[in-house]
Image: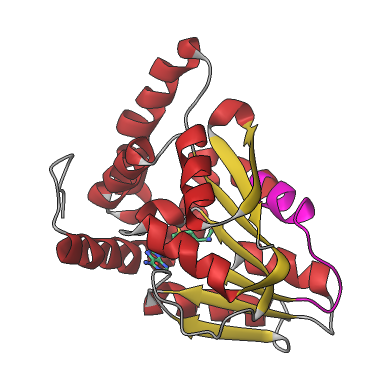
């Protein structure tokens, strides 16, 4: 399903995102490594390493997919803490659960199939809520941000790791070449699926840049919002607090 830059009705977009991730679930981890030359591991490590979290905390990782961030969070909350991995896609969630079990993580994990736009958790139930490479796929991002705020305890932190706007002008043509020429070919070669990877490249370009996303977090009600670039703005980490 290739749908380029045309406007897609909301319900249809949700369905397409569903198809994209069902179709890439099996090859998702390999493709992440190939596409980013393994650098996504460093971004995720930094994202979790600098999060406000301590042993015993209860944390939510939204759009958790195959569980990279959830596994890192588990190391930080320890055996007394718990990690809820939420994702809208059953196929991604199943790959995530299998991978966690293979890594020896069983206790302290919950897997919840849910839409980030309307979470099935009570108010004030988490110390930290994260979403990594997920927000750009969510149709109503403002709703997702408001839901993250709602489920946080007072004093809790929300963190977003997402592709963002590359700062250096000279790097942009190179980056576009990688995204629009290399990625779909890699997708075709490794996953027999060029369209899904074309979609991923396009969704990155449509995602709000740094300052705009921070303004969205402020509008959703987060306090002390900030962001920082990683790798020259290829990705950015946004955070905000519930006060
Ligand atoms: N966080 C993981 C990582 O960093 O490797 C997975 C990121 S993957 C690119 C995006 C994930 O977002 C997919 O697993 C997809 O199913 C999920 N997703 C898309 N829309 C969603 C929504 N509305 N609510 C929850 N999850 C969603």
Q: Taking 56 as reference, is 221 left or right? A: left
| Residue 90 image point, x, y percent | 39, 79
Left or right, 237 with respect to 199, comes to right
Side (left or right) of 144 relative to 239: left
Is residue 243 shown above or below 99? above
Q: Which residues are magenta?
A: 43-57
Please identify the quadrant where the C terminus is shown. bottom right
Q: Quadrant of the N terminus?
A: bottom left
Q: Is residue 66 visible?
A: no
Examine the image and state in which quarter residue 74 appears.
Answer: bottom right
User: 100 or 206, which lies in front?
Assistant: 206
Ligand number 1: quarter of image:
bottom left
Which residue sits at x=48%, y=60%? 145
Q: Which image quarter: residue 173?
A: top left
Percent x, y of residue 186: 37, 42
Nearer to us in this view, 238 or 108: 238
């Amino acid at each position: 399903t290739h749908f380029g830059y045309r406007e897609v009705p909301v319900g249809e977009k949700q369905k397409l995102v569903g198809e994209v991730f069902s179709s890439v679930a099996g090859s998702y981890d390999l493709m992440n490594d190939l596409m980013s030359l393994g650098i996504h591991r460093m971004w995720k490590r930094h994202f979790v390493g600098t999060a406000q979290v301590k042993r015993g905390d209860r944390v939510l990782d939204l759009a958790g997919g195959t569980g990279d961030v959830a596994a890192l969070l588990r190391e930080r909350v320890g055996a007394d803490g718990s990690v809820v991995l939420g994702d809208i896609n059953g196929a991604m969630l199943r790959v995530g659960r299998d991978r966690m079990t293979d890594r020896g993580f069983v206790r302290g994990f919950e897997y919840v199939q849910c839409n980030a736009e309307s979470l099935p958790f009570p108010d004030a139930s988490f110390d930290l809520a994260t979403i990594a490479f997920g927000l750009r796929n969510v149709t109503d991002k403002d709703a997702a941000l408001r839901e993250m705020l709602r489920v946080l305890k007072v004093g809790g932190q929300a963190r977003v790791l997402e592709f963002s706007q590359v700062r250096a002008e000279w790097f942009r043509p190179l980056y576009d070449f990688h995204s629009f020429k290399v990625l779909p070919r890699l997708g075709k070669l490794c996953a027999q699926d060029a369209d899904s990877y074309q979609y991923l490249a396009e969704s990155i370009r449509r995602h709000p840049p740094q300052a705009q996303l921070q303004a969205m977090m402020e509008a959703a009600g987060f306090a002390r919002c900030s962001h920082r670039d990683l790798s020259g703005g290829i990705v950015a980490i946004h955070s905000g607090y519930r006060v």
